[in-house]
Image (cartoon, rainbow, N blue to C red):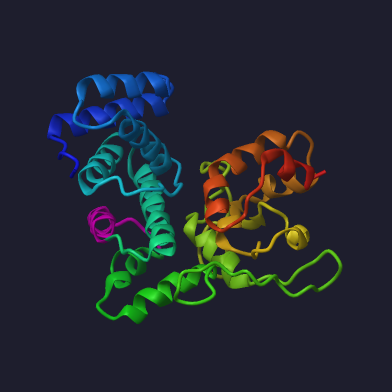
Amino acid sequence: MKRKKLNTNHLQMIYNISDDVYNGKLRRVEGVNILSENIKEHKSGSHGMYIDDYKYLRDAIPYGRNMGKDILDCFLRNITNEYGLDALRNALISTYKHIINYYNKTQIKQNSDRKIGKYYADKYNIDLDFSERIFENIYDDNEEVYINLININSNLSDASGKYLTKPKKIITSSRYERNIKTSVSALKAAGYRCELNNNHVTFIRKTNNQPYTEPHHLVPMKYQKQFKVDLDVENNIVSLCSTCHNKLHYGKNFEKDLKTLYESHKHLLEMAGIYITFQELLSMYD
């Protein structure tokens, strides 16, 4: 049965509750209960996913399902009005990542999300170097244009959307070949911001006039032989400022930061066929 369309009051309530949960004013379970009591047309599971989707938008993390054009529009509009253009930029990065990941998984194009994202990017002149490609050319009538964009992620073996399964060439006993294009794509997808803290200050890189961040393989490449799938994929690469990057490699008390990255990227790792617990990951950093 087709899900009943949300009215304006319901949409605003979902935003308000999701925002309160995100800001720590409500626990997630409390937010779900309030929405379930007031929006009985939808199951409680949907309410929980709305709350989660909002968090993903705020944190520039791809949401996993199609939330619907009305709720996405409501979220983007309110985020812009209450938190400004930096917050909108994060939400558009989240939308970009969702479109790519959803296509990789299902081969289905997200026209509604694309149109809404493009509308807000154009309206507020959001400076995303990938915005024209993801929000416009990606759905050109020429299918090749779409496939070419998908392939900039360097996650795919071909246009079928399957992740690479052939391991990288071994350079030394502990070092594997890396694709620089994959790392560049991961930095672009993160908006050239530190994924541990978007507010970390960095400098402007000479080569592309973008904030300087560094790519980091969350599951280290030296453990490639333990996996049947390629670890050198965008879903396994995070964008970090130089300080956070070096802390993971050389600093004390890095475990909390590593766990933050693991929790925000766990679903992305699994989409790439990389299944690992946090304790297993932590042992790779000893």
Q: Main secondary structure of the magenta part?
A: helix
Residue stretch rendered in magenta on the structure? 111-128
- Where is residue 280? Give x, y as percent: 73, 43
Q: Residue at x 29, y 34 (%)?
A: 82
Image quadrant assignment for residue 283: top right
Q: Residue at x 72, y 72 (%)?
A: 177
Q: Is residue 37 left or right of residue 96?
A: left
Q: Residue at x 63, y 57 (%)?
A: 214
Q: Nearer the viewer, residue 213 or 77?
A: 77
Q: Is residue 178 left or right of residue 34?
A: right
Q: Nearer the viewer, residue 210 or 71?
A: 71
Q: Residue 50, relative to residue 201: is it above or below? A: above
Instruction: Look at the image and tell me whether residue 280 can be seen.
Output: yes
Image quadrant assignment for residue 264: top right
Q: Nearer the viewer, residue 208 or 237?
A: 237
Location of the C terminus (image quadrant): top right
Check if residue 126 falls in the magenta segment. yes
Q: Residue at x 31, y 64 (%)?
A: 109
Q: Residue furthest right?
A: 173
